[in-house]
Image (tube, rainbow, N blue to C red):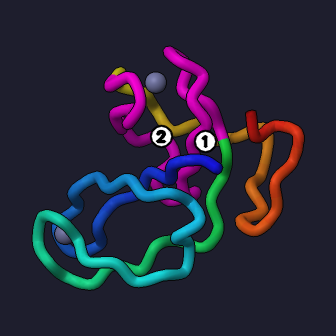
Amino acid sequence: MADMLFKCPHCARHLVVEDSAAGETLECLACRQPVLVPKSANAFKCPSCAYDLSAPTKVAGKFFHCPNCGSSLIVPATPTMRLPVNSFGDWAR
Ligand SMILES: [Zn+2]
Ligand SMILES: [Zn+2]
């Protein structure tokens, strides 16, 4: 289980959801528009606290804040592991 970082397509606010919500439509907390949670995301770890995170490739290179420790981080452009949304590998610790 990891938290997914992505952007609201309507207001560009940074959003965080559990990646088990991939493919679901949620309401943006900021603009109240329906937002489709991206289905494919790349897994990476927070460089500050090693918290498991994921983000869709279209936000690679963008600044986000870690939902666990609050540090700013840059979503890696070339992640080392790809997250299959419905399976849990050894990396998920
Ligand atoms: Zn929004
Ligand atoms: Zn962190």
Query: Residue beneath label 2, please?
Result: 61
Q: Name the residue under label 1.
A: 77
Please give the label number shown on residue 39. none
Residue name at image x 76 percent, y 40 percent: 92
Mark nearer the N terminus (2 vs 1): 2
Answer left or right for 9 relative to 48. Answer: left
Residue found at the far right of this picture: 90
Q: Does residue 79 belong to the magenta stretch? A: no
Residue 28, picture quadrant: bottom left
Q: What is the count of numbered marks?
A: 2
Q: How far is disc 2 from disc 1 in space, using C-alphas? A: 6 Å
Q: Give residue 71's position: percent from left, percent from top.
A: 35, 21
Say above or below: 40 vs 89: below
Q: Give the range drawn in magenta.
A: 44-70
Q: 85 above or below 5?
A: below
Task: Name above or below for residue 34 compared with residue 47.
Answer: below
Question: Disc 2 vs disc 1: Cβ atoms closer than 8 Å?
Answer: yes
Q: Where is residue 48 in the image (x, y as percent from the top left)?
A: 50, 15
Which residue is at 48% across, 81% downward? 24
Amino acid found under the numbered disc labelled 1: Ala
Judge the density around disc 2: few (<14), some (14-19), many (≥20) Cα neighbours within 10 Å: few
